[in-house]
C-alpha cells in the first residue's frame, strides 16, 4: 500500500507517523510474501511486531492529543478503536512469541494490518482532518 498525500490529515507529526507506518507495513509485506523460509523471515517479522507494539502506543497518544486539542467530538469512539487495535497487536505479538513458525498467524496479522491501514488511516483519521480544517476556517 502506497502513501498518498490525500491520506494526510494536516498535522505534521501524525502525517509523518502514518508515512512511517506505511513504509514499515510495505517492508513487512515484502518479507511475508518472499520465498524465504519462515526461519529466515523471523527476525524481520519480530522487528515488525516490536515496532507495531511501540508504534500503536506512541502514535495513538499523539493522535489522541491532537483530538483533545481540537475537542474532536468523536474522541471517545476513536480512542476505543485505538484501544481495540492495541489489544489486537499485543495478542498477535503474544501468539507469535509462543509459535514463531506459525505462517498462518503471520498472514492473518498482515491482513489485519492492511485492513486497519485502509479503514483507519484512510477513513477514520480523515474525519479528524475534516473537523480540524472546518474548525480552523472559522
Image (spheres, rainbow, N blue to C red):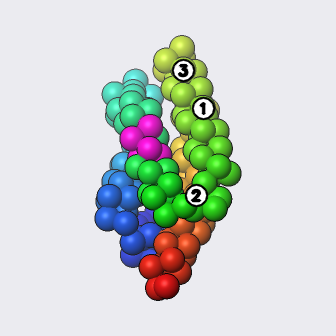
- What residue sits 57% from the left and 62% below the top? 72
Q: Is residue 22 visible?
A: no
* Relative image position of residue 86 (x, y in whole percent): 55, 36
Q: Nearer the viewer, residue 94 or 31?
A: 94
Mark sitting earlier along the chain (3/1): 1
Q: Secondary structure at mark 3?
A: helix
Where is 25 relative to 15, above or below? above
**First in residue order: circle 1 vs circle 2:** 1
Question: Crowding near pointer 2: few (<14 within 10 Å), some, many (20+)?
Answer: some
| Residue on which the image places disc 2 | 120
Residue neighbourhood size for the residue with mark 1, other residues' Cα within 10 Å, grouped as few (<14), some (14–19), many (≥20): some
Examine the rendered structure and indicate whether residue 103 appears above or below residue 55: above
Q: Is residue 22 left or right of residue 67?
A: left
Q: CA distance from mark 1 to mark 2?
A: 15 Å
Residue under circle 1? 87
Whether label 3 touches label 1, CB < 8 Å: no
Amino acid at each position: 500500500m502506497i502513501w498518498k498525500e490525500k491520506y494526510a490529515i494536516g498535522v505534521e507529526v501524525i502525517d509523518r507517523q502514518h508515512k512511517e507506518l506505511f513504509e514499515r507495513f510495505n517492508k513487512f509485506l515484502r518479507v511475508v510474501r518472499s520465498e524465504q523460509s519462515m526461519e529466515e523471515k523471523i527476525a524481520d517479522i519480530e522487528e515488525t511486531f516490536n515496532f507495531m507494539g511501540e508504534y500503536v502506543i506512541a502514535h495513538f497518544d499523539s493522535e489522541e492529543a491532537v483530538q483533545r486539542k481540537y475537542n474532536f467530538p468523536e474522541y471517545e469512539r476513536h480512542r476505543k478503536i485505538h484501544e481495540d487495535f492495541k489489544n489486537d497487536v499485543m495478542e498477535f505479538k503474544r501468539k507469535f512469541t509462543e509459535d514463531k513458525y506459525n505462517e498462518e498467524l503471520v498472514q492473518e496479522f498482515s491482513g489485519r494490518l492492511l485492513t486497519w491501514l485502509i479503514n483507519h488511516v484512510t477513513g477514520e483519521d480523515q474525519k479528524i482532518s475534516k473537523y480540524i480544517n472546518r474548525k480552523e476556517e472559522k
